[in-house]
Image: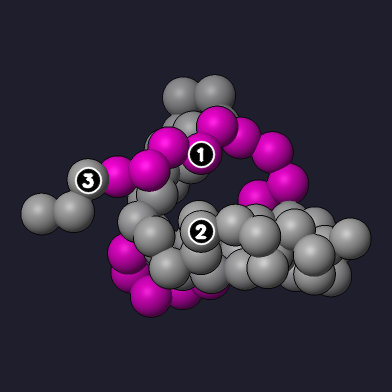
Amino acid sequence: MIEKWGLNTDLFGKKVAITRGPDITTGTAMRLDESGRLVLRRDDGHEETFDSGEVTLRMST
């Protein structure tokens, strides 16, 4: 199911902001991991996974 969802989304490769409470993390949505968590390449180049949060597309500049 995770693979199928990943094939049917255009989120990957897009700049996003993930909001969890007062914290906002920005970067590029990369893929879903084997547990269904969103893998984000942060703006500093490190990858981080998220299993919850509000994902917002960012405008390109």
Instruction: Rate crowding at label 1 as few (under 14), some (14 to 19) or many (20 or more) other CA atoms within 10 Å.
Output: some
Amino acid type shown at disc 2:
Asp
Distance between the alpha carbons at the discs numbered 1 and 3: 13 Å
Q: In this rendering, would 33 be left or right of 20?
A: right
The earlier-in-sequence mark between 2 and 1 is: 2
Residue under label 2 = 10
Q: CA distance from mark 2 to mark 3?
A: 15 Å
Front position in the image: 32 or 8: 8
Spatial CA span between label 2 and label 1: 13 Å
Span of residues in magenta:
43-58
In the picture shown, does residue 18 fall above or below 42? above
Residue bearing mark 1:
55
Picture residue at 60% right of the left edge, 57% below the top: 9
Nearer to us: label 2 or label 3: 2
- Please tell me which residue is depicted at 80% across the width and 65% down the height of the picture: 4
Name the kind of residue labelled 1 in the image: Val
Q: Is residue 49 visible?
A: no
Q: Quadrant of residue 38?
A: bottom right
- For mark 3, does the 10 Å Cα neighbourhood hold few (<14), some (14 to 19), or many (20 or more) residues? few
The part of the image, by quadrant, that contains residue 59 is: top left
Q: Secondary structure at mark 3?
A: loop
Q: Does residue 49 show up magenta in the picture? A: yes
Q: Which residue is mark 3?
A: 59
Q: Nearer the viewer, mark 2 or mark 1?
A: 2
Q: Are marks 2 and 3 in contact (CB under 8 Å)?
A: no
* Any part of residue 53 in sight: yes
* Residue 10 placement (x, y as % from top left): 51, 59
In x, y percent, where is residue 47? Answer: 53, 71
> Badge 2 local density, few (<14 within 10 Å), some, or many (20+)?
few
Pointer 1 and pointer 3: residues touching (CB < 8 Å)? no
Specify which label sits upstream in the sequence, 2 or 3: 2
SS of the residue under disc 1 = strand
